[in-house]
Image (cartoon, rainbow, N blue to C red):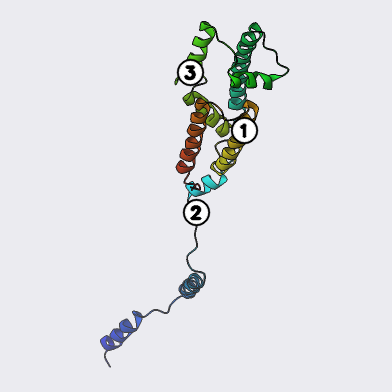
Amino acid sequence: MSVNGVTGATDAYSTYSVPSKSTEVKNETKTAGQAAAADTGVIYEPSEEAKAASAKKYTPDTNMIAKLKADSDARVAQFKSLVEKLLLGQGKTYNNANDIWSILSSGDFTVDPATKAQAQADIAEDGYWGVSQTSQRILDFATALTGGDPDKIEEMRAAFEKGFKQAEKTWGGELPEISQKTYDAVMKGFDDMAEAAGIRTEA
């Protein structure tokens, strides 16, 4: 036998290598992992945006609430003072605040030109007691109370409806047209808020 023949045989066998133990372990691990994935299915991992949304905390905006209340209280006090002077000047008497509203609702009084002009300015479309500003203040107050939590929209709507009914009771019947328009504007505002939050409202 030639030396070259032996050498050739050695070279032929040297191309085959025995798999290492680490390779076998890796293959076994991969196979086990594939089996586990097949058993459990796809695992959902929420995105960072979803995690942030679920972790969001809604807290009342106390600064806005205080500001809205202070502004409203001042305006109501100013209005009541004007009405009291008007009624007292005409010899009207009343025992409490509710009597003021019942006298106003009866229409049994006269208004001087200056008071009438001020009242008309206040209830004009762009006035403080007009439909636009009043409805927006109510919606702002609801948002401040809930911290903007969309899950509280219907709770705020129910509270507004309850307050409106109480106002009708104090007034002694159906409120004036401007109040009805304000009611409609507020309800539409709640509808818009719910739609923006993707919440279905009952028809």
Instruction: Look at the picture and state if 169 lies above or below 24.
Output: above
> Which residue reaches farthest bottom?
1
Q: Amino acid at mark 1?
A: Gly
Q: Residues within 10 Å of mark 2 (few under 14, many from 20)?
A: few
Q: Amino acid at mark 3?
A: Gly
Label drawn at residue 163: 1
Classify residue 85 by image quadrant. top right
Instruction: Look at the picture and state if 94 lies above or below 43.
Output: above
**First of labels 2, 3 by sequence position:** 2
**Nearer to me, 111 or 7:** 111
**Residue 146 appears in the rendering:** no
Could you tell me how far apart the alpha carbons at marks 3 and 1 are, in whole angstroms? 22 Å
Q: Amino acid at mark 2?
A: Pro
Where's residue 137, x and y in %? 53, 26
**Nearer to me, 20 or 38:** 38
Q: For mark 3, what is the residue? A: 127
Could you tell me how far apart the alpha carbons at marks 2 and 3 are, in whole angstroms? 48 Å
Where's residue 8, x and y in %? 28, 84
User: Which quadrant does the N terminus fall into?
Assistant: bottom left
Could you tell me how far apart the alpha carbons at marks 2 and 1 are, in whole angstroms? 41 Å
Classify residue 67 by image quadrant. top right
Q: For mark 2, what is the residue? A: 46
